[in-house]
């Protein structure tokens, strides 16, 4: 195989891996945002109904 083709394939694979990694990070951010919105919704519902709500420190802001 020609060296140019080999370097192109290596660069292409690295670019694909970087793209996959960034898409995974975006998916985790979206998942966290949705979980936080659901947490806030459950917290509001608990406050309206007067029941006790377990606080999750991961979603609470200082």
Image (cartoon, rainbow, N blue to C red):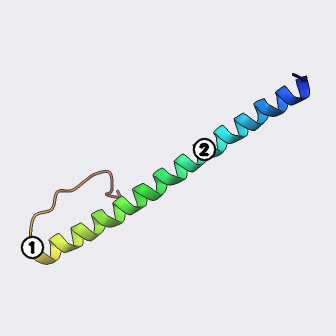
Dividing the picture into quadrants, the one containing residue 13 is: top right
Dividing the picture into quadrants, the one containing residue 48 is: bottom left
- Percent x, y of residue 5: 87, 30
On the picture, is 53 further left or further right than 38?
left
Which type of secondary structure does the marked residue at label 1 adopt?
Answer: loop
The answer to whether 18 is drawn above or below residue 7 in the figure is below
- Percent x, y of residue 42: 23, 67
The residue that disc 2 covers is 20
Along the viewing direction, whichever of 5 and 24 lies nearer the viewer: 5
Along the viewing direction, whichever of 39 and 22 lies nearer the viewer: 22
| Residue drawn at the location 53% of the way across and 47% of the way down | 24
Quarter of the picture holding the C terminus: bottom left
| Residue drawn at the location 23% of the way across and 73% of the way down | 44
Q: Residues within 10 Å of mark 2 (few under 14, many from 20)?
A: few
Along the viewing direction, whichever of 59 and 18 lies nearer the viewer: 18
The numbered mark, 1 or 2, whose residue comes first in the sequence reads: 2
Which type of secondary structure does the marked residue at label 2 adopt?
Answer: helix
- Percent x, y of residue 20: 60, 44
- Percent x, y of residue 41: 27, 70
The answer to whether 34 is drawn above or below residue 19 in the figure is below
On the picture, is 37 further left or further right than 50?
right
On the picture, is 3 further left or further right than 26?
right
Along the viewing direction, whichever of 59 and 34 lies nearer the viewer: 34
Q: Cα distance, mark 1 to mark 2?
A: 44 Å
On the picture, is 53 further left or further right than 14?
left
Quarter of the picture holding the N terminus: top right
Which label was assigned to residue 50? 1
Q: Residue furthest front?
A: 1
Which label was assigned to residue 12? none
Q: Residue furthest bottom?
A: 48
Q: Nearer the viewer, mark 1 or mark 2?
A: 2
């Amino acid at each position: 195989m020609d060296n140019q083709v080999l370097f192109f394939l290596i660069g292409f694979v690295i670019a694909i891996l970087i793209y996959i990694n960034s898409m995974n990070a975006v998916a985790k951010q979206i998942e966290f945002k949705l979980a936080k919105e659901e947490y806030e919704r459950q917290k509001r519902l608990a406050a309206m109904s007067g029941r006790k709500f377990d606080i999750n420190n991961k979603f609470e802001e200082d």
